[in-house]
Image (cartoon, grey):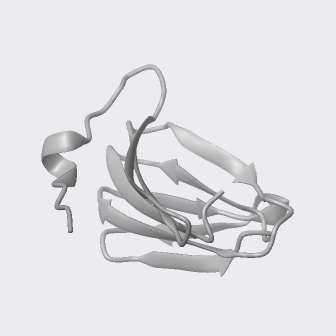
Amino acid sequence: MKKINLFDEGNFNDIAFKTLLVHDSENFKILNFNFRAGQELGVHSHDIDGEVSITIIEGTGEFLAADNATIPAKPGDVLVCKIKVPHGIRATTDMRALVTIAPPI
């Protein structure tokens, strides 16, 4: 077992969003993304089988999808989709998100 406190370990960067690798194994990967207001991880997809979840820990923003579609994102919201489905995230305030990818890429 291991314990990581995202608020202690993960910080913010004014130039680009900050990524913290929380866990990486053959089964899944967990990443913490910290975004300043206005930063984003643009819409993208991966041509592999698997799923991704994006959980909003702190702050607000939007989940991004194909065709410029957006879904409001606030603390406690979880987006789950096939990793082949276009997805992304944009912060409207400083925001922390936890991303799980299974299997890991």
| Residue shown at the point (39%, 61%) measured from the top left | 98
Query: Is 2 situated left or right of 89 in this image?
Result: left
User: Looking at the picture, how far across and down is residue 69, in whole percent?
Assistant: 73, 66
Q: Quadrant of residue 101?
A: bottom right
Number of numbered callouts drawn: 0
Residue at 16% in and 54% down: 5
* Residue 23 placement (x, y as % from top left): 39, 57
Q: Is residue 78 above or below residue 4?
A: below
Residue 14 picture location, percent across and down: 38, 22
Q: Quadrant of the C terminus?
A: bottom right
Q: Nearer the viewer, residue 37 or 4?
A: 4
Question: Which residue is at a point 56% across and 42% down the rendered structure image?
Answer: 40
Looking at the picture, tell me which residue is in the foreground, 65 or 29: 29
**Quadrant in the rendering for residue 82:** bottom right
Q: Nearer the viewer, residue 49 or 34?
A: 49
- Taking 89 as reference, is 81 above or below it? below
